[in-house]
Image (cartoon, rainbow, N blue to C red):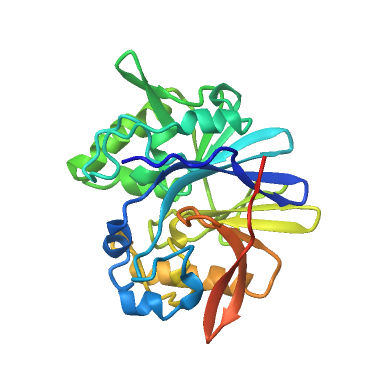
Amino acid sequence: MNASPSAGAPSWSVGGIRVHRIDETVLPPATGAWLLPDATPALVTAQDWLHPDFADAEGVLRLDSHSFAFVLGGLRVVVDTGIGNGKERANPAWHNLRTGYLQRLTDAGFPPDEVDLVILTHLHADHVGWNTREVNGEWVPTFPNARYLVSRTEREFWAGQDMEEARRQMFRDSVVPVEEAGLLDMVDIPVEGAGIASGLRLLPTPGHTPGHVAVELSDGGHRAVITGDCIHHPLQFAHPAVGACVDIDPEGSERSRRALLGSLAGTDTLLLGTHFPPPTAGHVVPHEGAYRLTPVPADRH
């Protein structure tokens, strides 16, 4: 079942930048227990601040699939492209979706033909799906006038892997067509991050995948960071050692998560979670020897 998010794209202001959340689908309740197997109900319910937005009363985690989109320096930018429609996927929750994502993206002011830049935090199936759409039986770039950016480390890692068939399928329908169209750019990400445009940087947050990046926006002294899968769920603020079952380097993922949370704690930087359900965004604050998220509600336009 695909969720139907309410009308009006939620958005947050970062100085003069307005960041829109483009909803794709609510992930099934079983997702949290599969993705974060150490996030036991007891661990979740002990963090009462997670309820009711981020977890239910029984400790079941809530997770979403969405993109973020914004205009910066005249560029229309989309960060991560979700699961996509009509994709053959091994995960039943991702298989052959039929959502209104593209219409929501368009309604928010980002028609596919007018998007200039697509940033991929990493190359997993639920982050690259709308890279392409099916036209006359062929997978073609959804954003034909955009440059798609990915970490060079990320693309080269997967190029060197003997991938299982499900992952090969994902690359065939959602990555290779973009490459064959000459639209994919690989970016070297130094330790201090890579500047992409004024006010836009990619931050290395390896572990979930070797070339994973977070995305930093800044304008007029205001700052925001989009997590990608460095952090899947706010529970990981309280328990940074809780990792995802699909982390390629679990220890590296924890290091990146702790470093990011530590750098943001007590600051005014807005953190936007790529899989966080509404309210999705907030500030990182110290809490009981770790951290918690103080939500910042979205506007709707």
Identity of the residue drawn at 65% across and 57% down? 224
Identity of the residue drawn at 33% across and 61% down? 32
Q: Is residue 151 visible?
A: no
Q: Position of residue 186 (x, y in %)?
A: 49, 40
- Image quadrant for the N terminus? top left
In screen coordinates, is 189 left or right of 136? right
Q: Is residue 156 visible?
A: yes
Instruction: Name above or below for residue 176 compared with residue 249.
Output: above
The quadrant holding residue 245 is: bottom left
Furthest toward the bottom, the residue is 289
Identity of the residue drawn at 36% across and 68% down? 243
Identity of the residue drawn at 34% across and 43% down? 125
Nearer the observer, 232 or 103: 103
Furthest toward the top, the residue is 136
Instruction: Name above or below for residue 246 compared with residue 168.
Output: below
Q: Position of residue 29 (x, y in %)?
A: 31, 57
Instruction: Name above or below for residue 34 compared with residue 168.
Output: below
- Image quadrant for the C terminus? top right
In screen coordinates, is 263 left or right of 212? right
Instruction: Name above or below for residue 109 compared with residue 15.
Output: above
Furthest toward the right, the residue is 220
Nearer the observer, 106 or 126: 106
Q: How many marks?
A: 0
Q: Position of residue 37 (x, y in %)?
A: 28, 68
